[in-house]
Amino acid sequence: MAGMRGKQTVRGMFQSMAVILVAAGVIYLFVPHDENADPIKPVDYGVELVTAQRAAPYPVLSPKGLPTDWRPTSVSYERRSGDAWHLGYLTPEREYVAVEQSTSAPVTYIDEVTHGARDTGAAREVAGRGWQRYEGPKYDALVLREKGVTTVVTGTADEKRLAEMATALRPGEAPTPAPAAPSPAAKAPGA
């Protein structure tokens, strides 16, 4: 009798597995999928930019005037982590470029966001400012140290693309407050 129960358990397991495989096949057939579609979806970073502009103690930078084939892919602002602003992009060549800003200690912060890139001792003038050139095994970077904030343009892209991003960076514009609506009790002039 015990041998019979063991055979039934194994048979039940195979039957259950067959039902699951059939269900998975049906789902696969009816769920639309396009192998040619680009899996990387651009992000809209407008809300995060406004949030960072309001909270950060420095002018938050974002690119203005980049060609449309540059695609934003990631964004974050972390007040507790040194007021860290991050905005990641893919270049037309599908290389990664990120804008990183923080009030954290520059040496530690630069090492963290560049994944260990080191100062080459060379400077590059970009948009009238002297950026330090960093090179690393994973990312290269352009670094701008200013009073109270370190700005890093880093990624897998070449120096030309890093400089293109650095050139496009502009301080975000403060949000314009909405005009105050007149109160219902207010009287129009001459009334």
Image: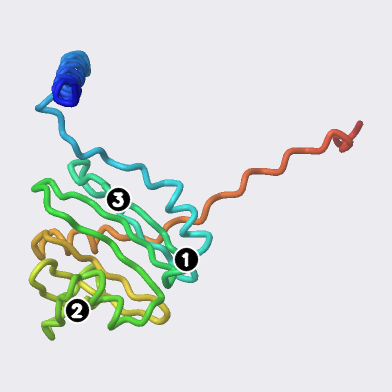
In this view, which residue lies farthest toward the right? Answer: 191
Q: Evaluate whether residue 24 shows in this view.
A: no
Residue at left offset 18%, top offset 36%: 39
Circles 1 and 2: CB distance less than 8 Å? no
Q: Which mark is residue 132?
A: 2
In which quadrant is the C terminus drawn? top right
Q: Residues within 10 Å of mark 1 (few under 14, many from 20)?
A: some
What residue type is disc 1 on?
A: Arg
Q: Amino acid at mark 3?
A: Ser
Q: Could you give the CA–CA distance between mark 1 and mark 2, rounded to whole angstroms?
A: 26 Å
SS for dot 2: strand
Q: Is residue 144 above or below residue 163?
A: below
Q: Amino acid at mark 2?
A: Gln
Which of the 4 quarters of the picture holds residue 105?
bottom left
- Relative image position of residue 122 (x, y in whole percent): 12, 82
Q: In the rendering, at what x and y percent does residue 183 appear?
A: 82, 38
Residue appearing at x 41%, y 63% in the figure: 60
Along the viewing direction, whichever of 9 and 80 lies nearer the viewer: 9
Q: Could you tell me residue 179's position as x and y percent? A: 66, 43
In whole angstroms, how far apart are the C-alphas of marks 2 and 3? 24 Å
* Residue at mark 3: 74
Colour treatment of the image: rainbow
Task: Tell me the residue at 14%/80% (across/down).
Answer: 118
Task: Determine whether the residue tagged by mark 1 lies in a helix, strand or loop.
Answer: loop
Sequence-wise first label, 1 or 3: 3
Q: Residue furthest front?
A: 1
